[in-house]
Structures are given as structure tokens and as C-alpha cells.
Image: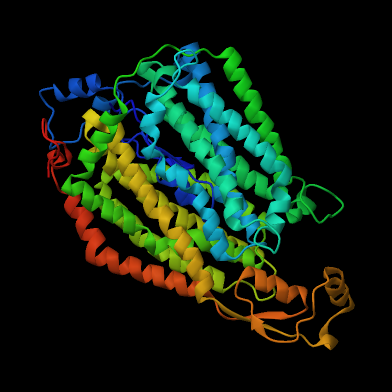
């Protein structure tokens, strides 16, 4: 049954625990969680026969974790693979890469670009666009079971999904600039309508991902199935890197004026509309090539939809699973303000998208290298003890990030020293996040019932992902709620000729009375009318301290004792009882 349902992935790929076979994607400074929480393990659900063979061994015990050698006897190098496997590996990389393009935009670049047009609360609404990747567990059995024999089990979903994605990106590419400028404004579309288009694209990517994960099990030969995880890592990482770091840099006027063109201009060398249009056509061309040139082997259904849903329900009734679900749902509250707001706050203060792209670019090799060491440590220490250390470090990272924001240069000019400080803060935050991810991945791999590994792992990954996704909407709205700022009229004598001309061209009325400018729309009105938006209380600092306090209290009183207690349980405590609905 494990091969029937694919686990939910997040759009960031990271180095996972060597023993766990997991991979993960990281795309943004403030939205890495969407990409970190749900990357599957491609070989842990090969078949019931493999699981039965393992459990039939005389040395097998539910009180011991099978060694990596028992799980996977294959150790082929890539260039030793059969030619057909190498070709199919390239196809998987391409399909995962295409998924990373809209995901990198929806969870990375677009929120940064929206900061110039929307309040934190409105960006919180936009964050809902990433939810399909966190919830695809609920319709993955349908994608596995409903298909056309004439087209192929996986192509029945991949072809129409990619075609719809391409058409959606073409339409959005022609309208996105105007939508971003007018969303939330009088006469313009609502933020919910704008979010809906990105929700649609992420929904298409999430559904395609289910089909591609399933296809990977038959595209590669059984001995080399572990390369599906490598293809996912390479493809998703490259796609999100392209749509976040590369796009953000080339979209930035500062980056283009400094490094690319001799004559400064007020726009970058790449627009969001043009980028979406290019990849929309690329989606359609790849879909056409897949339809014409790639044949899919005939397959048949092994498990019904209701069998999978029944397994999910049985797992949910396990007492220990209910405990780990509670832990996952509250564990990431402590660092939500750092993950969701820090990068946006830096941009708000004038850090610049070019510096942000440079920060992520420099962090990328550190992320891969430090992920390797985190994987080694997960073998030397018990997983949830290592996870607890990462948790504490991540709380510290949230406070370090707040300090970094608070000492932003008063002149508004980003100095080399301050840029280095932001980079070091980001590397530290990423490292602690990686430790937590690798450790919890190893723990999930250890406790999952091998007879229903796919369903078990999907459920654990989905809950872990939701723990980092659902609080973001509320955190961003709380930042606006706790922010206090007043627009003060400016003395006309203090305005320069250029400022007066700008006000006249904007057609904005001069600010004559004080009013609140805590949200972005009011701040824009204030500045356009020549006013000064003076902040009395920054909601980011209030919310971050509140989150860290909640994190410390829950960690000391509940989370740490519970995870160490759960880790000490024998593996039989996580298994379904044979012939009965559940086992507590």
C-alpha cells in the first residue's frame, strides 16, 4: 500500500538524514517552512513484499530500527545506471523543476514584491496560496486510483495538469503587474481574488507532484529507486532557486544597475509578467513533448481509495500518533514571526531585494554543507534529542533576527558590515531549521509502520507541514494589529521642489491632519501627500517576543518531555495491531 500514496512535499529541498533517505527544498528566507516540511522518502514504501521480507528475517524486531543496509541494498553510482534509468532520471528532474517555478514565486518572490503594495495582514491572506502543498494528502489516493488506461496512469494527470498550469501562467503573466498595483485599492481586485490565482497554480503543482512521485516508482528500476529522491532534490531546488534568488536579483533595479547595465534605469531586466509568460509556454511545450514522445508502461490498481483512507483513520486512532500530532501543530509557533516577517521587515526598512537575493545566494552552499553535518549528527545522537537542541537554537535565532532588524542603519544605507550581519543571522537560522528537519525526518522514518509506510509517512509529513503553515496567516495579521504609527503633516517649507513636484504628479491631497498609517495603504497615502509616517510601536517586535515566549513555555513544559518520552517507546507502540482497527 505504501507505493500507492505519495507523501506531501514542501517546496524547499534539503539534505536529509542519510538513514532517512529524505530530501528537502529551501527557497526563501521567510517561507522556508513551506518547502521543508513535507518532502517524502521515495524508497520507504517500495512494496508489501519488501516489508514482509524484512520482517521475516530472524533478526527483525519491533524494538530495533532496521539498519540502512537492510532498507536499501543498492549503491550504484549515477554513471553506472542503465541508460534508460539515466534518461528517466533526467525526465524526473525536469518535471520536479517545473513544479519549483510557480512554487518559488508563490512562497518566495511574490510576497516580497507585494510588500510595496500590501499590508502584513494582506500578505498573510496571500500565504494561504501555499496550503495545497500542505494538504495534498487528502486527495492523493484519488490521483493514484482514477486514471485512463489509454493515456497512462500518471500521464492521465500530468498532461492536463501541466497544460492548465501553463495556460494559467500565461494569463497571469499578462495581468499580474496590473493586479499587483491595484489589488486592495478602490476599484481594483481584492487580495482574495489575487490569492486565488496563485492558489490555483500551487494546487496544480501539488496534484502534479502526487502523480510524478508515483511515476518515479515505475520509471526507475527497483534497484535504483532511491534516485527518485535525488531527482526530486535537484529538480525542486533548482526550480525554486530560479524563481526566488535568480528572479528576485534580475527583477531588482539596484542589482541590474550595479552589475549588468552601464546606464541606470528604474526597473530590473526581468519582469514578473515576462517571467510567468516564458514559463507558461515552457510548460505547454514540455507537456506536448511528453504526450508525443514518452510512453508509459501499463499498470493496474492494487489498493482502492477507501483502503487508503481506512489506513489513515486507523493511524490517527493510535494514542502516540495523536500526541505527536499535537506536538507538530504547536512546535513551530515560537519561530513563526521570524520565519514569516523578518525578511519582509528588512525590505520594509530599505534592505532591498538585491541584497535579499544576495543573502539567499550566499546562504545556499552553507545550507547544503551544514545539512550534511546535521545528517551525520542525526546518526550519532537520538533524533528527538537533536531535534530539541535545534528547537532551542531556533528560538535563539528568532531573537538574533529581531536584534538584527532593530539595528538597521538609521541612514537607510545598507553597509557591508550590516549586510554581513544579516547573512550570518540567516545562516544561523537556516542551520537550526535544518537540524530540526533532519532529526524529525529520521524519527518519522524510524517509527513508520513498514507495511503501510507510504500512508504513515504522508500523514506525519502533512501534520508537520501544517504546524508551520497555519499560524502564518494569524502572525502576519497580528503584526498589523500591534503596530502603531501616525501620519504627521509636513511643513510645506520643509519640502523640496522635487517633493512638491512628486506630490503634484501623484494628485494626492496634502496631509493636513494626523491619522494612523500603521497599514501599508495608509502609509502610501501619507507619503504621497507629503506626510511623515512616524512609528510609535512596531508590531513585529511585539509579535516576535510573544511567539518566542510561547515557544519557551511550551517547549519546557510539554514539547521536550513528550518527544523524549515518545522516542523511548519501542517500535511496536507505533504499529497497527494485526486484525484489529487500532492499537494504543
Say whether residue 351 is visible.
Answer: yes
Q: Residue furthest front?
A: 187
| Residue 405 position within the rendered picture, expressed as x and y whole percent measured from the top left | 55, 69
| Residue 468 position within the rendered picture, expressed as x and y whole percent measured from the top left | 41, 54
Compared to residue 283, the image places residue 82 above or below, namely: above
Q: Is residue 570 left or right of residue 440?
A: left
Q: Nearer the viewer, residue 287 or 85?
A: 287
- Residue in the picture at 34% in, 36% down: 18
- Residue in the picture at 36% in, 51% down: 436
| Residue 54 position within the rendered picture, expressed as x and y whole percent measured from the top left | 19, 23
Quarter holding the N terminus? top left
Quarter holding the C terminus? top left
Q: Is residue 333 left or right of residue 264?
A: left
Say whether residue 403 is visible.
Answer: no
- Residue in the picture at 65% in, 44% down: 246
Compared to residue 354, the image places residue 287 above or below, namely: above
Amino acid at each position: 500500500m505504501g507505493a500507492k500514496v505519495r507523501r506531501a512535499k514542501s517546496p524547499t529541498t534539503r539534505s536529509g538524514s542519510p538513514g532517512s533517505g529524505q530530501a528537502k527544498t529551501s527557497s526563501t528566507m521567510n517561507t522556508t517552512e513551506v518547502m521543508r516540511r513535507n518532502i517524502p522518502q521515495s524508497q520507504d514504501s517500495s512494496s508489501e513484499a519488501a516489508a514482509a521480507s524484512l520482517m521475516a528475517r530472524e533478526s527483525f524486531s519491533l524494538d530495533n530500527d532496521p539498519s540502512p543496509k537492510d532498507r536499501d541494498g543498492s549503491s550504484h553510482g549515477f554513471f553506472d545506471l542503465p541508460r534508460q534509468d539515466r534518461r528517466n532520471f533526467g525526465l524526473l528532474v525536469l518535471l520536479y523543476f517545473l513544479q519549483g517555478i510557480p512554487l518559488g514565486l508563490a512562497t518566495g518572490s511574490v510576497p516580497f514584491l507585494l510588500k510595496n503594495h500590501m499590508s502584513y495582514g494582506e500578505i498573510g491572506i496571500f500565504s494561504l496560496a501555499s496550503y495545497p502543498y500542505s494538504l495534498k494528502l487528502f486527495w492523493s489516493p484519488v490521483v493514484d486510483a482514477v486514471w485512463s488506461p489509454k493515456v497512462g496512469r500518471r500521464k492521465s494527470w500530468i498532461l492536463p495538469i501541466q497544460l492548465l498550469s501553463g495556460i494559467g501562467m500565461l494569463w497571469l503573466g499578462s495581468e499580474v503587474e496590473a493586479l499587483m498595483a491595484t489589488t486592495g485599492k478602490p476599484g481594483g481586485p481584492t487580495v482574495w481574488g489575487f490569492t486565488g490565482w496563485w492558489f490555483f497554480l500551487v494546487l496544480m503543482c501539488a496534484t502534479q507532484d502526487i502523480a510524478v512521485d508515483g511515476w518515479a516508482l515505475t520509471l526507475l528500476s527497483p534497484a535504483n529507486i532511491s534516485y527518485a529522491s535525488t531527482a526530486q532534490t535537484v529538480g525542486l531546488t533548482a526550480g525554486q532557486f530560479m524563481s526566488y534568488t535568480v528572479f528576485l536579483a534580475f527583477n531588482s533595479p539596484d542589482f541590474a544597475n550595479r552589475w549588468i547595465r552601464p546606464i541606470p534605469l528604474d526597473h530590473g531586466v526581468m519582469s514578473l509578467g515576462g517571467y510567468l509568460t516564458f514559463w507558461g509556454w515552457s510548460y505547454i511545450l514540455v507537456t506536448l513533448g511528453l504526450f508525443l514522445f514518452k510512453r508509459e508502461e501499463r499498470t493496474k490498481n492494487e489498493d482502492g481509495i477507501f483502503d487508503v483512507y481506512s489506513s489513515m483513520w486507523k493511524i490517527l486512532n493510535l494514542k502516540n500518533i495523536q500526541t505527536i500530532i499535537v506536538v507538530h501543530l504547536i512546535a513551530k509557533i515560537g519561530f513563526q514571526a521570524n520565519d514569516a516577517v523578518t525578511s519582509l521587515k528588512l525590505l520594509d526598512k530599505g534592505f532591498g531585494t538585491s541584497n535579499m537575493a544576495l543573502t539567499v545566494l550566499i546562504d545556499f552552499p552553507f545550507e547544503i554543507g551544514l545539512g550534511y553535518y546535521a545528517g551525520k549528527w542525526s546518526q550519532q545522537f537520538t533524533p528527538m534529542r537533536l531535534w530539541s537542541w535545534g528547537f532551542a537554537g531556533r528560538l535563539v535565532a528568532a531573537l538574533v533576527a529581531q536584534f538584527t532588524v532593530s539595528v538597521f542603519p538609521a541612514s537607510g544605507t545598507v553597509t557591508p558590515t550590516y549586510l554581513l550581519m544579516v547573512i550570518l543571522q540567516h545562516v544561523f537560522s537556516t542551520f537550526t531549521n535544518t537540524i530540526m528537519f533532519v532529526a524529525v525526518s529520521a524519527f518519522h522514518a524510524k517509527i513508520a509502520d513498514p507495511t503501510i509506510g507510504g500512508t504513515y509517512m504522508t500523514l506525519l509529513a502533512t501534520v508537520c507541514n501544517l504546524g508551520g503553515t497555519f499560524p502564518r496567516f494569524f502572525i502576519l495579521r497580528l503584526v498589523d494589529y500591534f503596530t502603531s504609527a501616525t501620519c504627521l503633516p509636513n511643513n510645506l517649507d520643509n519640502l523640496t521642489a522635487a517633493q512638491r513636484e512628486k506630490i503634484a504628479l501623484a494628485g494626492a491631497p496634502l496631509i493636513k491632519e494626523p491619522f494612523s498609517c500603521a497599514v501599508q495603504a495608509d502609509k502610501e497615502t501619507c507619503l504621497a501627500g507629503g506626510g511623515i509616517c512616524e512609528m510609535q510601536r512596531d508590531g513585529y517586535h511585539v509579535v516576535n517576543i510573544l511567539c518566542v515566549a510561547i515557544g519557551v513555555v511550551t517547549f519546557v513544559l510539554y514539547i521536550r518531555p513528550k518527544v523524549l518520552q515518545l522516542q523511548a517507546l519501542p517500535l511496536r507502540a507505533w504499529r497497527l495491531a494485526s486484525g484489529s482497527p487500532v492499537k494504543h
